[in-house]
Image (cartoon, rainbow, N blue to C red):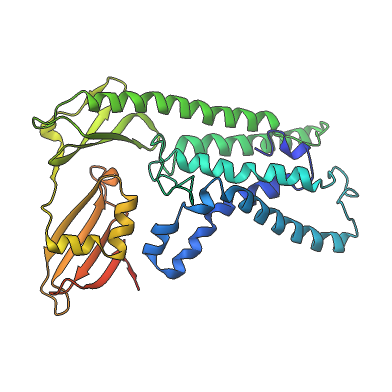
Amino acid sequence: MSRAGLNRKTGLATATLVLAAEASDIDVFYAFRGPVAVLQHHRGWTHSFVGVPVMAALALLVVWAWNRLFRKRRLDPNLAAVPGRLPVRWGVLYAIALLGPLSHILLDYSTAYGIRMFEPFSYKWYEWDTVSIVEPFMLGVLILGLTLPSLFGLIHEEIGARQPQFRGRVGAIIALAAVVLMWGVRDFYHRRAVAALEARIYQGEDPVRVSAYPYPGNPFVWHGVVETTDLYQTLLVDSRRGEVDPQDRARTYYKPEETAVLEAAKKSYLGRVYLDWAKYPLTTTEPMEERDVAYRVRFIDLRYSYPGRRTPLGGSVDLDSNLRVVAQRFGRRLQK
């Protein structure tokens, strides 16, 4: 974004944008309060529209402090004495900094994990479900957009060509345009995948909800999840042909019976946080023979149950014989 033209407006634009775009992830410090606290607060207010001016100001404060140190060393209040360096326009720089957390919101919204972009006024999760959290095509075009101009610059230096003050603008614009085009393609095929899932009957029942989740780097194949009154199904969807895998190859999960054990687990800290975040939550109850643990209730979200992959982002609650919570885990980490 900076190389696309914003670095021509004021000095320190690139450093400010980089910090502002990453500032929203400051919520990772909730990890000191345990893994469930991270799940509860991650992609919350720091990723919301309310948090945008705060995150931009935080990034600008860091840049200002660094600039003060640098200025004292160089005795140059605006960095203008350095050849080719633009003076710093702090008002313009703050306006540019606002684009950093806004881009962060857009990128996180495009994934299946979701984002609470209107917190603290609404705690609803929003997700576009169009790209993977790690998307090879997006990473590839952005890396090329940054590195190829530098490579061409080295070639120009070798042949003695005159170097422009700002280079890489065309490459950056092309890379950003490619990302926007990718979103458009992904959204088109995502809608086709959802429509194919909605058009079917599942073991004699109409679907209550359907969703399609992306595979990295492939805009045509989707992980489909369907909910009916009594069950969930996960299926493979080919959105290029508008076809869904036959149901005999689908994975079927029947909804568990509501019991006192399950109710106690749902009321635990992990249960409340997990069920608020999960879109297709599935629970299993396992009797235990440990001295202090009578039951273990596991929580998974079927949107991450890709065939052949270990299901991540799951949790568990241990209960004693009196249905009191003994332990809570998210992933492999214990919540204290």
Where's residue 135, x and y in %? Answer: 44, 39
Q: In the current view of this chain or complex, which residue is farthest to the bottom?
A: 291
Residue 267, above or below 24: below
Where's residue 125, x and y in %? Answer: 40, 45
Q: In the current view of this chain or complex, which residue is farthest to the left?
A: 204
**In which quarter of the view is residue 265 placed?**
bottom left
Q: How many marks?
A: 0
Residue 103, above or below 178: below
Residue 207, above or below 241: below
Which residue is found at the position 51% from the left and 39% from the top? 106
Q: Nearer the viewer, residue 184 or 324?
A: 324
Which residue is found at the position 41% from the left and 44% from the top? 114
Where's residue 282, x and y in %? Answer: 21, 50
**In which quarter of the view is residue 189 placed?**
top left
Q: Is residue 214 left or right of residue 321?
A: right
Quadrant assignment for the C terminus: bottom left
Q: Nearer the viewer, residue 133 or 110?
A: 110
Where's residue 112, x and y in %? Answer: 38, 41
Quadrant assignment for the N terminus: top right
Which residue is found at the position 45% from the left and 65% from the top? 31
Q: In the current view of this chain or complex, which residue is farthest to the top?
A: 241
Q: Nearer the viewer, residue 166 or 260?
A: 260
